[in-house]
């Protein structure tokens, strides 16, 4: 799903949610201005989209169901493409980047942020935590994603033909240490219901580790996000 913003006034729908989510787009805020067309790819419920538009560029906000690899926009028709937490789920990130570049006008901007689990901060990071996360990464890859997408996205953006590629690493506490453990455990248990060998043994071991992690007490978790800006 993508959100499309245009115009120069404020869209007030779900303003509270927009304020809560707007920090995810802070790094891209200098790109937004009156009269711009901005596409938020992978917008979910639209809270970040509305945050982008709040006081910056939106008089209308349209939500469309579309494929990131085949956006319903003409060539060189968009000022900014924004994407948060999208590339870690894509099977073909290069194709999506090529599509983003197609719809951007010359001189238009790409702004994206994607996570890098290889640099996530977890304390304590025990053997159970490591084993549970390996199972989590396996599920991500089985779904066609890349849990370490943040490591490779700058090179992929450059290879697609974007210029002036700039990146910044940001750590953010998106959830608690214990809530993450519970989430990973639930995912692994659900996956076990349909798993076949050889995945089943690995997932079962990871689920046991996640069970122990979820009951081991509190800790600290901060996800690593790679924030990237580039020019068409």
Image (cartoon, rainbow, N blue to C red):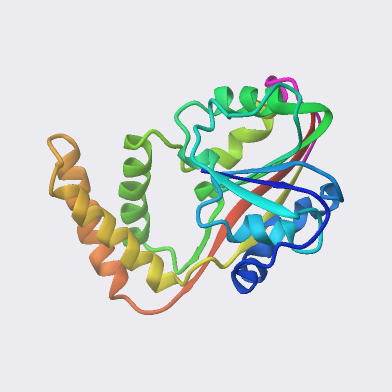
Q: Is residue 45 magenta?
A: no
Left or right: where 203 falls relative to 33: left
- Image quadrant in which the C terminus is located: top right
Residue 77 position, x and y percent, is: 75, 29
For the point 75% across and 55% down, the residue is: 59
Report which quarter residue 153 is drawn in: top right
Residue in the foreground of this view, choosing between 104 and 217: 104
For the point 39% across and 71% down, the residue is: 179
Residue in the foreground of this view, choosing between 196 and 102: 102
Left or right: where 136 falls relative to 92: left
When the figure is inspected, residue 131 is found, relative to residue 124, above or below; the finding is above
Residue 34 position, x and y percent, is: 87, 50
Left or right: where 36 falls relative to 169: right
Residue in the foreground of this view, choosing between 163 and 121: 163
Residue 214 position, x and y percent, is: 30, 71
Which region is colored magenta? 158-166
Q: Is residue 162 magenta?
A: yes
Left or right: where 84 falls relative to 189: right
Residue 180 position, x and y percent, is: 40, 65
Report which quarter residue 24 is drawn in: bottom right
């Amino acid at each position: 799903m993508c959100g499309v913003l245009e115009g120069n006034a404020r869209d007030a729908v779900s303003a509270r949610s927009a304020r809560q989510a707007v920090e995810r787009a802070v790094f891209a805020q200098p790109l937004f201005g009156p009269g711009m067309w901005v596409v938020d790819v992978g917008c979910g419920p639209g809270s970040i989209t509305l945050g982008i538009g709040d006081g910056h560029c939106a008089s209308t906000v349209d939500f469309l169901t579309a494929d990131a690899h085949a956006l319903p926009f003409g060539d060189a028709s968009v000022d900014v493409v924004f994407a948060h937490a999208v590339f870690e789920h894509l099977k073909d990130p290069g194709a999506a980047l090529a599509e983003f570049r197609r719809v951007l006008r010359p001189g238009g901007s790409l702004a994206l942020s994607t996570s890098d689990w290889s640099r996530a901060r977890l304390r304590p990071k025990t053997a159970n935590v490591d084993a549970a996360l390996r199972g989590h990464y396996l599920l991500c890859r089985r779904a066609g994603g890349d849990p370490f997408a943040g490591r490779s996205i700058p090179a992929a953006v450059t290879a697609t033909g974007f210029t002036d590629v700039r990146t910044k690493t940001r750590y953010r506490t998106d959830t608690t240490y214990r809530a993450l453990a519970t989430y990973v455990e639930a995912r692994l248990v659900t996956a076990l219901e349909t798993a076949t060998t050889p995945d089943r043994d690995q997932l079962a071991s990871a689920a046991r580790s996640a069970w122990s992690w979820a009951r081991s007490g509190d800790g600290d978790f901060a996800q690593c996000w790679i924030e990237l800006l580039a020019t068409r």
